[in-house]
Amino acid sequence: MPPQGSTIVMPADEPHAGNIELTENTIIVVLGASGDLAKKKTFPALFGLFRNHFLPKDVKIVGYARTKMDHEEYLKRVKSNIKTPTPEMEHQLDDFLELCTYIAGQYDQDDSFQNLLKHLEELEGGREETNRVFYMALPPSVFIPVSQHLKRNCYPKKGIARIIVEKPFGKDLGGSRELQAALGPDWDEQEIFRIDHYLGKEMVKNLLILRFGNTFFNATWNRQHIDNVQIVFKEPFGTEGRGGYFDEFGIIRDVMQNHLLQVLTLLTMERPISFSAEDIRDEKVRVLRCMPPIEPGNTIIGQYGKSVDGSKPAYKDDDTVPKGSRCPTFAAVTAYIKNERWEGVPFIFKAGKALNEQKTEIRIQFKDVTSGIFKDIPRNELVIRVQPNESVYIKMNSKLPGLTMQTIVTELDLTYRRRFSDLKIPEAYESLILDAIKGDHSNFVRDDELDASWKIFTPLLHYLDEHEEVVPMEYPYGSRGPKILDQFTESFGYKFI
Ligand code: NDP
Ligand code: BG6
């Protein structure tokens, strides 16, 4: 039986260049097309959209990077991460590759961008009105020159331009404002789509529906009923091959200030007036502005050492990592929201690389059950598993069937792969690129949202950068993290059930 439900009412915003759906006359330019993100995520997502007929009619996809590649070499790269398990998909891939071309050029030279423009104009066949979507799959060091050269050389004379920018958006509040100040004069906020790919994940997109579409959740979603919340990100692999990048950023900048904070925002914001992009983002900014900077005292940091059996390397064994690096590969920090709904509730972020498993989840622990008729009855806990194996389950108390009055903790469980076994969950990047084509900004980060989120983390980040005596606690590769972790979580009220 197909899932039954209602449809979300989408408001009719005033149409403007930023929210018009691109249905034709469109070229997507992937800058940094020789890179890791383009290969692993961007091209597979574009193919996914193409085969499901979601790309604009007669779209063309142009790759751009410095690496010199001939057409065949480039196509090999484009398809290297695309899976085609059926003959039909093989054919679809052949059709997709017909749309793809590549131009090599520098990131800081007008000549190179003029060359790109010439190529775009050839593909556009002299059409007057053209839409161009620029996807910056590039390291942050070249965001600014590339965006400026694009504006100067490749901005359409008539038609719509969009620029999709990848994280990291700066390294702190100052850096983020610099980036903003550089993009601002050239690109209108409505033309900018700042990707945080967690906002494209199915379960993250479900958060507002779960909260506001269910009276029983909505009614208990506050400090009167919730004791503490954890937002957890665990990866079972280290920074292998990315040590150079990672050492400059660390786990807090890499996943916490962006991905996990976005999850927290959706989890805690007030009900938006509508599902329009601006109404949602207004509420997100409001809740972020209620969060004071995180206290260094409410933080622990760790760095992975070798695995217990010695088979997996320590973080510092990577040649691209400086020998005395203090870079955290693990952090647990507790934040608070000073508003009517959340005052006093600890929000504990935990994120780490080289841990014992892969998991991103939200754990909401409710307050103690009133005692009296019960002795030591455990708390309820709602778990929203973002990945892998998307699910929502509530740990609840029930009578153990039988002749005694014994209780047992059991689960009300919505596991997607059981309930929605015949539905495919789209990749986050598919969902977000489609939103950018449609002009839907709801799942992209707005400039004031970025500012508010950096304000929460920047003082802590500066403290950690500047205080050399603060060294991360070592934990073995493949473990649960630093030993002190459970004590830390318990100190904010979490009770292990
Ligand atoms: P890469 O390091 O693979 O860089 C992409 C391309 O940019 C390279 O192929 C290279 O192309 C060019 N490039 C690399 N370093 C420099 C440099 N120092 N100066 C100028 N050009 C350079 O990055 P990714 O593809 O991994 O990431 C791109 C962006 O996406 C980054 O902002 C990253 O943070 C973000 N991101 C990446 C994810 C991933 O899974 N990889 C996940 C989420 C976000 P050429 O030399 O041919 O010009
Ligand atoms: C990226 C981080 O933004 O997100 C990576 O730079 C991290 O370090 C990745 O591994 C996690 O994304 P996902 O979708 O695999 O959870």
Image: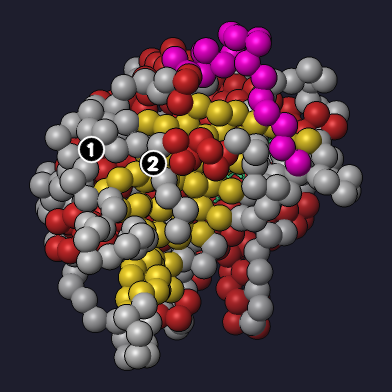
Q: How is the image coloured?
A: secondary structure
For the residue carrying disc 2, how many other residues have a C-alpha within 10 Å: few (<14), some (14-19), or many (20+)?
some
389 up-or-down from 322: above or below: below
Q: Is residue 474 inside the magenta stretch? A: yes
Q: Residue 342 has which mark?
A: 1
Give x and y (percent) for residue 356: 68, 52
Disc 1 under 8 Å from ligand 2? The reply is no
Residue range corresponding to the magenta coloring: 459-476
**Side (left or right) of 346 relative to 276:** right
Numbered disc 1: secondary structure: loop
**Side (left or right) of 292 relative to 354:** left
In the rendered structure, which amino acid carries the disc numbered 2? Gly
First in sequence: mark 1 vs mark 2: 1
Disc 2 under 8 Å from ligand 2? The reply is no
Nearest-to-viewer mark from 1 and 2 = 2
Going 35% across and 36% down the picture, which residue do you hit? 346
Give x and y (percent) for residue 409: 40, 70
183 up-or-down from 91: above or below: above
Q: Residue 359 has which mark?
A: none
Observer-nearest residue: 10 or 372?
Answer: 372
Going 52% across and 13% down the picture, which residue do you hit? 462
List the residue tagged with mark 2: 493
In the rendered structure, which amino acid carries the disc numbered 1? Trp
Observer-nearest residue: 361 or 485?
Answer: 485
Going 35% across and 52% down the picture, which residue do you hit? 364
Give x and y (percent) for residue 227: 30, 45
Q: Is residue 176 visible?
A: no
